[in-house]
Image (cartoon, helix red, strand yellow):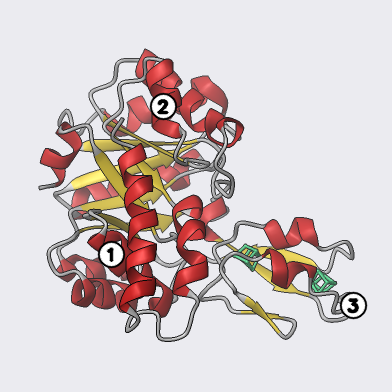
Amino acid sequence: MLEKLLKSKKCFKLVLGAGNEDTKSIEKLMKVYYEAGCRFFDLCMDENVAQKAKEICPDAILCFSYGIKDDPHTVKAQINPSKCTGCLNCEETCIQNAIKNGCIDEQKCLGCQKCVSACHNKAIQTYSKTKNLKEILPKILPYKPQCIELHAISDNDTEVENNWNYISENYNGIISLCVDRSIIGDKGVIKRIKKLIEKRKPYTTIIQADGNPMSGGKDDWQTTLQSVAMAEIIQKNNLPVYLLLSGGTNSKTKELANLCNIDLNGISIGSYARKIVKPYIEQENFLENKELFNQAVKIAKELINSTYV
Ligand code: SF4
Ligand code: SF4
């Protein structure tokens, strides 16, 4: 089913967040986007999340994401109370509503670091929260994922390869590698991809070309530019992989990719997809209120349709 979707070149993936363990928001987002036509969901590699996702959309295509140490998707934020003046800038900035009363809810925090930039007192630090892949992967496999994603934005080749090899040896489905060029540069990215796909069959790997991870708050050309540029670098190398775009993706991404002659299999959207339905899903009794729910679905549908142009 996933291969068919990728081959259709109209693959839309909703990214719920590699670090998002907040099952309440996951439920609302999955229900809205499923109703709007999305069938492919990218979730945190966590047992509770997997169980919930299977309950919500039993026939959806599930991808579980794992981030290696220091990859931006494993980052969590923390407030130092001794430096905090209680100005609430961070609370207002956090799209996840993860900050309340001077504390950050680790389960909700995605590590986007927008709060860090918003704090003029340097009161917010970050840390990397990683899981043990050998412990978590066997717990996820019974939920029959159709894709496992490795977030590998790091210069630690050994760490990347060890995790990749473990997934390859223990999982038979499609594996997605999420990479950007911020740390290892254009040549480094291609070298890494070639090495990792060497022993895999052609078209059993997705390369998720990440522009600026978790940067997709705005719906403009600039925000999505890096994701398209990253895709262009991958495409030039003519690799036997499926190509998805992420990291700053929005309703302009497909149009820009078309203008640049990028032949995509699909687009993964996280921050922007979550942001546009946020005013609706935050309201009380959202799931029971048909009118509100349908308004959110309409907005989600427009975004999905923008990736089909
Ligand atoms: S922005 Fe900084 S100082 Fe203001 S409430 Fe947040 S952590 Fe405290
Ligand atoms: S702004 Fe981003 S990093 Fe900060 S608490 Fe919210 S989700 Fe976490």
Residue at position x 31%, y 42% in the image: 305
Residue 10, image x and y in percent? 23, 36
Mark 2 beta carbon near ligand 2 (under 8 Å): no
Residue at position x 54%, y 63% from top? 110
Q: Do the residues labelled 2 and 3 touch (CB within 8 Å)?
A: no
Callout 1 amino acid: Leu
Viewer-side residue, 85 vs 302:
302
Residue 148 position, x and y percent, is 27, 53
Tell whether 256 sits left or right of 294. Answer: right
236 to 143, vertically: above or below: above
Q: Is mark 1 on a helix, strand or loop?
A: helix
Which numbered mark, 1 or 3, is in the foreground of this view? Answer: 3
Q: How crowded is mark 3: few (under 14 residues within 10 Å), some or many (20 or more)?
A: few
Residue in the picture at 40% in, 79% down:
286
Q: How far, Cα to Cα, is label 2 from label 3?
A: 44 Å
Task: Quickly name the residue at label 1.
Answer: 137
Q: Where is residue 174 in the image (x, y as percent from the top left)?
A: 20, 44
Question: For disc 3, does the CB lie below 8 Å from ligand 1?
Answer: yes
Q: Judge whether residue 162 can be spotted in this image.
A: no
Amino acid type of disc 3?
Thr
Q: Which mark is residue 85?
A: 3
Give whichever of discs 1 and 3 has the lower sequence position: 3
